Image (cartoon, rainbow, N blue to C red):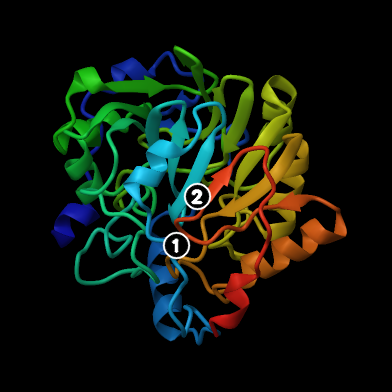
Amino acid sequence: MIFGWLNAKLPTDTSRFEESPQYRDGRFQNKKPHKRKGKSAAFSFIRRLIKDQKTDPRPVKSMPVYNINKTELFLLDDNNIHIIRLGHSSLLLKLGSDFWLIDPVFSKRASPFSFIGPKRFHQPPISIEQLPPIKGVIISHNHYDHLDKASIKALCKRADFFMAPLGVDGDLVRWGVRPSQITTFDWWQQLQLGKLKLTFTPAHHYSGRGLDDNSSTLWGSWVIQYNSQKIFFSGDSGYFSGFKSIGDKHGPFDLCLMESGAYDANWPFVHMQPAQSMQAFIDLQGKQLMPIHNSTFDLAFHPWYEPLDTLSELAEAKNIEILIPKFGQVVTVGQPLATEFWWKDLN
């Protein structure tokens, strides 16, 4: 198992990537490439995890979680987009009468190993077995905190469709998803399914599940439009000019689900600091801001609650509507949500 992580499987047929403007020199590239530090950076990160003293890396008290009632999910109206945060960047969406998942991670750890690696602060508000029928699964990229093998294996017979970046289909097929269920996307490609339109949009990040498969599959963000409502899911990204391009082409957005968490001064190109998440939201022409990529796994060196504290302060200063629901709480796009500052009482 350890050697499987050291030598993650590369896509076997790369010829289909040659037409992608993002694919050059045998790897996918960002719009403005930055130099990757390679294996030494991975081992440096591990050394920091072992040696550095962290301040409040996880909550002391139990995280408040709403247990999702499946019956109540079906009673949600079919006209608005409804969003339920399951943890980290994992989301359950109700689009009309259909349910969709984004980056579903139900496992105990965001790790290639079952016995070590970042462990959840809280249980998911619903189990995979309790989920309603899933129309589709949307994936942003293949990092362990966004693409979970155990979850995909459990969902492959429960979901109709899988929407994935170029190359990620290789892992999905190995884990039991039928090729006929999968649609792969390059940046700016779209798919219309009745009243639902999905557009895969750029991000400034990278991919990889081992030490030897860096950027062998694509990564990105998603524009999700249902009826007249439109939301943006950032996936993982450093701050870059692409946010303004996405806002100009597809904005304004009723709600933006923005990465804010697991950032560090040493990772300026692949994760955003809170002020950058706010600027990206402004670039996107968003109306409501909902931070994700925080409060479930200890993946960085800042206090676990810092992203929520900082981004809520920035939103108040700029008079921007920010939504910070408890896990399992229903957010209905276009409707207000009282911020309870629930995270402040947990340490």
**Image position, residue 45 (x, y; %):** 44, 69
- Which residue is denoted by mark 2 in the rendering? 36
Q: Could you tell me residue 238's position as x and y percent?
A: 61, 48
Q: Amino acid type of disc 2? A: Arg
Residue drawn at the location 74% of the way across and 32% of the way down: 244
On screen, residue 345 above or below 308: below
- Residue 282 as seen in the image, left or right of residue 71: right
- Which residue is pictured at 47% across the width and 78% down the height? 58
Q: Quadrant of the C terminus?
A: bottom right
Q: Image height check: is 178 above or below 153?
A: above
Q: Position of residue 9 (x, y in %)?
A: 21, 41
Q: Label 1 belongs to which residue?
A: 41
Disc 2 residue crowd, few under 14, some 14–19, many 20+, Cα 10 Å: few
Distance of label 2 from label 1 (alpha carbons): 9 Å
Using the rendered view, name the quadrant where residue 169 is placed: top left
Q: Quadrant of the N terminus?
A: bottom left
Q: Is residue 208 visible to us here?
A: no
Please state the horizontal and vertical placement of residue 151, each as a whole percent of the image.
24, 48
Secondary structure beneath dot 2 equals loop
Q: What residue is at 38 percent from the left and 37 percent from the top?
A: 74
Contact between labelled residues 1 and 2, with CB atoms less than 8 Å apart:
yes
